[in-house]
Structure formats: C-alpha cells, structure tokens
Amino acid sequence: MRRTYLSHIVRISLLIVSLVLFAWGCAPKQAPMTNVDMLATPNLLLEANAAWEAKRFEVAELYYAKLLERQDFLLDDKLEVYPKLADAAYRNGHYHQARIALEDWANVQTDALGEPIWERLYLDTMAQLGKTERLRNHLAWVLRNDRLPWLTREEVALWYGQYYQTRGYVEEGLDVLDKFYSEAPDTVTKAGFENAYLQRLQEMTDRQLDDLSGAITTENLWRFPYALVGFEFDARKASDEEAWSTVWRNMRSLVKNAELVDTAPLEAKLSELESQYGVPRIGIALALPLTGPYGKVGVKILRGVGLAQWRLAQQGVDIDMRVINTESSDWNERLAALPSHYTVVGGPLRVSAFKELTATTAGNSILADRAFFTFMSSLGDLKEGQDAWRFFTSHNDEVRSLVRMTVEELGIKDLAIFYPEEKFGRAMAETFYSESYPLGGRIKGMQSYPPRQLKQWGARIGKLLNVPDDFRDNKDAPLEQPDFGAVFIPDGWGQAQTLLPNFFFYEGDQLVFLGPGLWSRALDNAKDIDEHYYRLAVCPGAWLEDTDGGRNLQNALNEEGLGQADFWVALGYDFLRFAGKLGAVSPSWDADDINKRIAQAEKIPFSMAPISWNSDGVAHQDLYLFSPVRNGKQLVDADKMKIRIERAKARRDKRIEAYEQRMEEEAKQQIEKAKSAQQGM
C-alpha cells in the first residue's frame, strides 16, 4: 500500500517537474533535475535537502518519496525526512499524501504526536481536507492528554484559536484558549502562553481584533485570553485623541486587575503610550442633596462614590471629583463655574432640582456643556440619550420585569390595574398598560381610587372585582372570581398594607399582587410583616446583597469601615466606576460620542442590578423580583408561587363545594318540611 502511494507520488511529481522543465526557457534558470536512479542514497538525501532549502518543494517531495522506497535508507534518516515530506506535500496541495506521510511517521515513531511540527502539519492537513469531526475529536484528545509536552499543547491551542476565529466562531476559539490555559502546569508555562498569544494578537489586523473584542463580557474581561484581547484592542485606538482617555482607563484597569501571570508586557506598552499621549485628566461632578429631607440619601450615594474613588486610585486611576449640594440656592451657578474638564455629571436625584436646571437659559447651557447621568426614573420632556442620560431604574424597567414574570413564568396573561388618582399612580398605570401587550399580557380590569379617602378603598376594590351590591345579604355565597389573575397596584408600601387585606375580604386571595419599586425599598427596613396577605405579592428592586456584586461591595465597605451596603450606596459606587470608564470626555463632546463611550463603560461589574444602554443611549435595567416576608423580603421563586396560587384556588374550590353541599342540605330540609306540612293537613 505504502509503496503504491510512493510510486503514485513519483509519477505525479515527475509530471509536475516535466511541465516545469517544458517552460524552462520562460522561467528563471534553476538547477536541473537529477536522475535519482543514478544517485546513491546518501547523495539523493543531499539533493533532496538542497531542493528543500531552495524551496523547490515539488522536487523535494519527489526526492523524499524516492528515498523512502530504498531498502538501505536508515530509520534515523527517515525520521528526518517524514516531516519534510509531509510539509512539501502540503505546500504542493497534495493533502492526502501529506496525511499518509504523517501517519507513516507516527507508525515508526511512537511519540511523533508529541512533536509541535507533527501537530501543526496534521491540523493544517485535516483542515484542508475538511475533516471537521476529526478535528473536534483531536482537540478533545489533546485536552485530555496531559502527557503531551506543554509546548505541543500550546501549539495546538493557538492553532485551534485561529482556526475557529477564521471561520467566524470567535467565542469557541477563545474558549479553547481558556481551557488550555487552565491546564497549564505552572506559572512559567502560563506566562509563556500569555506572551505567545499576545504576540499573535499584535500580528492581527484591526478587523480581526474587533471580531475578538465582541466576545468580551463583564464576566470574562479579566481572564486569559480576553484580558489580552481587550488590552490590544484598546492599545490600537490610543492615537485617537477623543478615545485616548477611555482606552487609557481600560488599559490601566486591565494592568491592575487582569488575572494574568505576567503583566510586564502590558505595563511596558501602557507606559510607552502614556509617554507619547500623556495621562488623561478625568473630571466628574456630583449634583446631590446633602441637606434637607433627602440629605441622608445623598450622603449614602456619596459614601459609595468615595469608596469607588479610593479603589480606582489604588489602581492608578485618579479622578478629579467635585460634589455640589443641590439644596443650595446657587447650585446651578456653582455647577456652571466648574472648570471645563468636568464634563460628566452624576445627578440630580430630585425631579424638582432637574426642573430647576432645565427651566432657565443658564440651565440649558449647562446641559449642553456637560453630560448628565441623572439618578431619576425619567427625564421628563428631555430626550434620553441626546439631551441627557439616565443612571437609574425607570418605570418601564419595573413594569417589564413584573409583566415578564407574571406572563412567562406564572402563565398569567389576564391582568388588572388598581391605581391611586394622583400623578405617580396615573403614570405607572399608563406604563403598565402600554408595556403589557407587547409582552403577552391582556388588561381585563382597570379601576382608580382616591389616595387619601381610605373609606372608599373597599368599595373601589369591590368594583374592580365586580362584587354585586347585595353581596352582604348572603355573606356565605361565594363571589364570582374576576377574569384576571394578577393586579398591579402602583402605590407605596404603607398604602399596600391597607389595600391588600381588602382584596382578601372580597375573596381575592388567589390573585397575584404586583407592586412598584417603592415596596422593595421600604421592605429593606420593614419588620413584623403579616405574611398571610403577601404570599402572592411581588415587587421589583435593583439591589440584592446576596450576589457577587453585592458581596464584593459589602466586603469593600467592611475593609474601609464604611458600614452597610444598600441600594443608594451601590448606586454611587457603580456610577463613579462607570463614569471613570467613560474617560475624560472632551468639552466638544456630542451625544453620539457619549453613546459610543457608554458601550464600553457599561461593561463594569455592577454591584446593583446591571444597567445597559442601547445604541441610542436609552438605559434598561434588569431588576430582581421580591416577595415580602416577616422581616423584609426575599427573591421570588416562581415555582413555589405557582404552587401557592393552586393551593389558594383549591381552598376556594373547597369553600364552593362546602357551600353547595350546605345549600343542597338546606334544600332537602325545606322539601322535608314541605312534605311534613302537607301530611299534617
């Protein structure tokens, strides 16, 4: 079989050489072909190697194939020839012949698969032959086989990383590199792997790097190989004056936080770029209420901001920060008087302060000069992503989280709204109405109530539930159930504690009660709650301490002796790290520039529920969902809640069954009485 293969190579190669010689007069003069049959084996080996060195691969393939046919060709020499024969055949496009040469090599040298050159040639050949299944199997085998030399495994890892990338499977390629890196036996080999891949990245085109950067997430950005991809991707943009502050911030964070063995090459590159372009100056202003009724909230936000500033300073990122008390009468003037490099503002927190800002010509000028990230649920008449931005939960975020859970997880599509007749209630009711239908919900009931006339609340609930006016005449008769399974109540937690028991009075104990984020924040300090009324109550919130982000924030606060974390502390902590990642925004910024910067800045590891922005600069936050419990709140378990709903329905069915049996017994008794009366006549 092998002799037939070698003869086949000889015939093909002679044909190729004949064609080459036919065109000899038109081609540059080369050494003429030697009659291989006239040469002794040592001389033929010399001729083959000479052809190899001259890159005459057609001739080299022929000569090496002829050598392997000779009986006096020694094994040691064969081990030298097989790699060159396989490589020459591959270069000549003879992929099947290259595969056979590699297999022959492996047959005579049991550890050939441990040679980096064998692996590279084998993988290249299988790729050209389209053997995708064999390549997958080989990858799995190499990953399992820790007896292979590390340099060979590293060669395989780099090959597969490039193989998947060139075929559009970027995530798969990076995942392969990550897996091999985790298998590296020690820090020395890991450092070598890091440097080898960094060199590969430096050789890539901008387009290739851009494709790779799309796989970076907040979960992987500090790990190999993603950290190296992110660093090189940003380093390429250093010459862009507008982008420099942002990429510098990213690169500095990677140098300090990347989970790499050897960051020296990154530090050297960053130092080189800092010498060339300077260290950017980042100016951020905070517009917060530090006195008055909301002063405690402002101070909590500032506590988180201060912690973030200290942590960033330890990473070599110095942020020039100013805080302005929005309760001061001249806060607008003080904000306007800040130096021009304070281009990013966090706040205001209160709607009244923001209205005060936008009500004057001077205020509108401040908005035009500085990028505001407000801590409010809405920007009112301003256009989000153009006039200003939002770093806060919106009413739409709250409603979407509630409707998704109710429709998708609980399977309840028929909904109702019971809202107070005031601005917040009406706004939330409208939001719930508009957001429900796109998510599969159907509004089957809507009723308002006067917020300060508690005596009317029960009657309004009865109207929502279609309770008949004469229901008190027969208190034992079960009421008809409403044609909805959940009701949205956009009011405060204090009001909810009065409203929900009224629903139970009208046999609405199987309904799911959906509340706004106001409930969640109030429950952080609630005590001795009567859980009976709230087992089917749900409210959204942006803060949960028992998450990676929440625990990291609390640990950082503990280290500095700064007390307990909560939503407001998390808001300040996350904002400053986000704003720092925006970088030093140029005084000549525009909305498109800010929106582009946001796409990178939003990748911070949030301590509260993560916020993301679309390409138009509109913020969205995926919120946690909670249920009230005796001393606060806990995450909703949809499966347990479905069981509670079924139990409530079963209890109602039993009440109906008992009532019907009682009515049947009473009817029988009436009949018996009638019969007795007739007999007595």
Image (tube, rainbow, N blue to C red):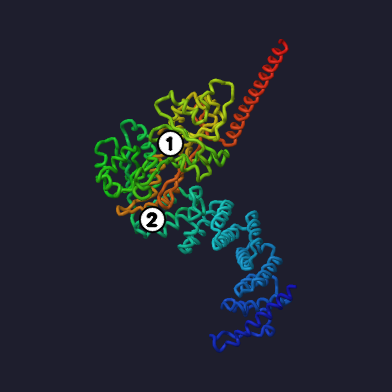
Residue 271's disc number: 2
Q: Position of residue 153 (x, y in %)?
A: 60, 58
User: Is 478 rendered above or below residue 405?
Assistant: above
Instruction: Identify the residue shown where x is 39% and y is 26%.
Output: 452
Amino acid at dot 1: Phe
Please state, as top left, top right, bottom left or bottom right, where the N terminus lies in the image. bottom right
In this image, 280 relative to 26: left or right? left
Q: Find numbered disc 1 in the image and state the secondary structure of the residue it sits on.
A: helix
Residue 621 showing in the rendered view: yes
* Residue 511 placement (x, y as % from top left): 54, 32
Tell me which numbered mark, 2 or 1, is placed earlier along the sequence: 2
Position above or below: 328 against 194: above
Check the image and name the residue furthest to the bottom.
Answer: 25
- Viewer can see residue 565: no
Q: Amino acid at mark 2?
A: Ser
Quarter the C terminus occupies: top right
Label 1 neighbour load within 10 Å: few <14, some 14-19, many 20+: many
Q: Specify the label residue 567 is tagged with.
A: 1
